[in-house]
Amino acid sequence: MVLPRLNSRALALHEAKLEPYLGYLHHIAWGLPSLILDFQDLYRYLVDDFVISYTGALKDRDFIFSLDDYSGRKCKRKFLNAVKRKEFLDAFDRGILTLRWTFPESEREEDRRLKL
């Protein structure tokens, strides 16, 4: 059997005799691995909690403002500056690896490991 190019998650589901394109929560769409999306949703709350908690400590000085043109309309956009972006990504990587997050300004640490 010739398999299409699958990423590691799709390959793991296929090896477990599951069909990565037949999801339960997400509808079947051509080329969309619905079951992978279903499994990702199980952990989405961890990312949401991290982003919401982390952004609570950000100030205006942590952002770069840009005026961009989208479809003929001027839009003001905010981006994290280089220092804060690196800090955010480092904290996120540490949190994903350990499922523990320390938030910068408060140095508060939360344990988000799954209790089995």
Image (cartoon, grey):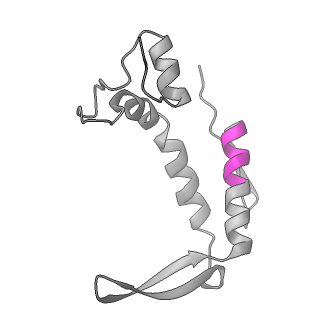
**Residue 94 located within the stretch drawn in magenta:** yes
Q: Is residue 33 left or right of residue 49?
A: left
Nearer to us in this view, 27 or 15: 15
Q: Residue at x 71, y 54 (%)?
A: 91
Residue 75 in percent (x, y) is at: 38, 86
Q: Quadrant of the N terminus?
A: top left
Q: Quadrant of residue 54?
A: bottom right
Can the viewer see residue 95 in this picture?
yes
What stretch of residues is rendered in magenta? 91-97
Can the viewer see residue 110 in this picture?
no
Q: Residue at x 60, y 80 (%)?
A: 63
Q: Quadrant of residue 98?
A: top right
Instruction: Count the labels in the image.
Output: 0
Q: Quadrant of the C terminus?
A: top right
Q: Quadrant of residue 22?
A: top left
Q: Majority secondary structure of the magenta segment? A: helix
Residue 104 in percent (x, y) is at: 73, 63
87 in relation to 100, above or below: below
Q: Residue at x 72, y 64 (%)?
A: 86
**Residue 63 located within the stretch drawn in magenta:** no
103 in relation to 71, above or below: above
Residue 26 in percent (x, y) is at: 28, 34
Q: Is residue 96 left or right of residue 14?
A: right
Nearer to us in this view, 10 or 111: 10
Q: Residue at x 36, y 32 (%)?
A: 33
Residue 27 in percent (x, y) is at: 23, 34
102 in relation to 43, above or below: below
Which residue is the extreme one toward the front?
Answer: 2
